[in-house]
Image (tube, rainbow, N blue to C red):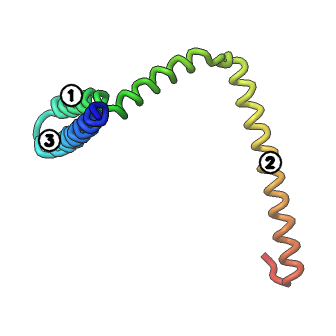
Amino acid sequence: MNATNTENQNGSMDLVKWILVIGLLAGAVVGNYMYGELSVLYRALGVVAAIGVALFVAAQTEKGREAVAFAKESRLEIRKVVWPTRKEATQTTLIVLAATGVMALVLWGLDGALVRIVGFITGIKV
């Protein structure tokens, strides 16, 4: 029964934290609007600071911890990726462009033929 009480307290605290996060983000938007006469630099720094604090508070929730763990795992997986060399990327890009050009010509020809066929059948000249 003690575990259930702890889970309920964590759940209610998470709700309070999420409300705080929403309040911080809303405050950043409202503050940016209300202090429109200030320098853009100061407003941008204020918004970035508010977002940073909101992210920190969000990371303290259960969903936030899961998101941080997911981001760390994703970063590890990205390190495992074998990225193509510049030459391979260029060759692949050229192949895609050539295939796209060929398909565009085929579809253009097919469209022209179908327009003529439908025009012949219906008697409407375009």
Q: Give the quarter of the figure containing the N terminus.
A: top left
CA gap between label 1 and label 3 equals 12 Å
Q: Are marks 1 and 3 in contact (CB under 8 Å)?
A: no
To which residue does mark 2 refer?
A: 103
Residue 113 to residue 102: above or below = below
Q: Earlier in the sequence, mark 1 or mark 3?
A: 3
Q: Nearer the viewer, residue 5 or 116?
A: 5
In front of the other: label 1 or label 2? 1
Place of residue 71 in the rendered image (x, y in percent of width and height, measured from the top left): 45, 25
Residue 84 to residue 102: above or below = above
Residue displayed at 89% across by 78% down: 120
- Which residue is outermost to the front? 1
Q: Nearer the viewer, residue 46 or 86?
A: 46
Residue displayed at 20% across by 32% down: 50
Q: Earlier in the sequence, mark 2 or mark 3?
A: 3
> Which amino acid lies under the numbered mark 2 shown in the image of this protein?
Met
> Which amino acid lies under the numbered mark 3 shown in the image of this protein?
Gly
Place of residue 96 in the rendered image (x, y in percent of width and height, measured from the top left): 74, 36
Residue 49 numbered mark, or none: 1
> Which amino acid lies under the numbered mark 1 shown in the image of this protein?
Ala
